[in-house]
Image: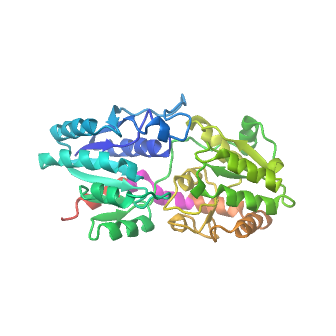
Amino acid sequence: MKIIILSTAYPLRGGIAHFIGLLYKELARINEVSVITFKRQYPSILFPGKSQVESSDTVEEIPTEILVDSINPLNWLAVGWKIKKEKPDLLIFKYWMPFFAPCFGTISRLAKKNNITKVLTICDNVIPHERKPGDIVLTKYFFKAVDYFVLLSEKVRNDLLMLKPGARNKFLPHPVYSNFGLSVDKVEAKKHLNITAEKIILFFGFIRDYKGLDILLNAMALLKNNLNVKLMIAGEFYSNEGKYLKIIDDLGIKENLLMFTDFIPTSEVKYYFSAADCVILPYRDATQSGIVQIATNFNKPVIAANVGGLGEVIENGKTGFIVEKENPEALADAVKKFYLEGREVEFVKNIAVEVKKYSWESFVSGINELIKQPA
């Protein structure tokens, strides 16, 4: 089968680019696959980070054509006609926010004019975490041109069916991010990061308001006088940094934190996860989270708020804990339980069994089953 993937991909950085790299490798085992990515993913004024380009020397490269300009309709027409002429059997998009819907929808419509190409989108979200006027209209515009939908959580699947009843779809759990390497010994990881704390919990990834770091900081205020646990914050601020620094000062918890708030290169990710005892996801809102599957790759338990599809991949009391959302007391109690009951060894053992469910081979097999369904 001839397949074109159009998405954020190498040399762009971030979790979606890593996802596409791993998907490409698995699909390319038995298919003819090419990848098209952005020459301008976001206008600089809309991008909250410091760089959109991967900086790690160790990131695994994949062949990509750098073609798409997200805000230039003439570019969309050119890319759409190019794909139409190449006549792929399947055009795959990764969809996570309505900003890209006009671009993706236009390219899809043009590509399908060859009467050969079918369009499949893998949806991180249907309804975005931080909603804006026009989101639903834009999403519907793109989705009208889509033939098949892969959803990474049941919540996203339900959102899809509200917007497009009868859509051909399949829920496939987010596969494990296996591209960050193997775990290293905790002592070695802490030495590499120049930290000495005995007990460490990890908040990892871009810092956005919906991820609930402020809730976790309030939980740390409840923990600061017992357990002697440190919270490691590893990720770049995509929200108002000053707001969080004020919370830290007001709560008097600066000494209880380990702050690494630059972008974490691919080659360094293993050290942060390996140094931690568990990973914390205090999200206000979520559909699923790639952070869970990075944690799974490193056999790390996860304590998460009960939002979206997190409870579908974290087995409460078996591979981590699920707690009431927006509740610092519940979060603090779960951390206490994790340490006081000595649950780390048990959870790690269970995760080593669960990881087999989340292979890329299974994910691609699910895609093949979906596209073989009759119209």
Residue 54 located left or right of residue 103? right
Above or below residue 268? Residue 374 is: below
Looking at the image, which residue is at 18% across and 38% down? 81
Q: Based on the picture, tell me whether residue 362 belongs to the magenta stretch.
A: yes
Q: Position of residue 152 (x, y in %)?
A: 43, 60
What residue range appears in magenta?
A: 353-363
- In the rendered image of this protein, does residue 52 appear above or below residue 103? above
The answer to which image quadrant residue 269 occupies is top right
Residue 197 forms part of the magenta stretch: no
Residue lying at 55% horizontally and 61% vertically, measured from the top left: 353
The structure's colour scheme is: rainbow
Locate residue 218 relative to residue 72 in the image: left or right. Answer: right
What percent of the width, then of the height, locates residue 115?
Answer: 12, 50
Residue 284 at least partly seen? yes
Q: Position of residue 11 (x, y in %)?
A: 44, 32
Where is residue 155, by image quadrant? Answer: bottom left
- In this view, the residue in front, 213 or 308, is 213
Relative to the observer, which residue lies in front, 342 or 321? 321
Residue 306 drawn above or below residue 187: below
Residue 50's place in the image compared with 226, above or below, is: above
257 to the left or right of 105: right
Measuring 80% from the left and 63% from the top, which residue is drawn there? 222
Q: Is residue 199 visible?
A: no
At which x and y percent is residue 76? Answer: 26, 39
Question: Residue shown at 35%/53% (left/top)?
Answer: 364
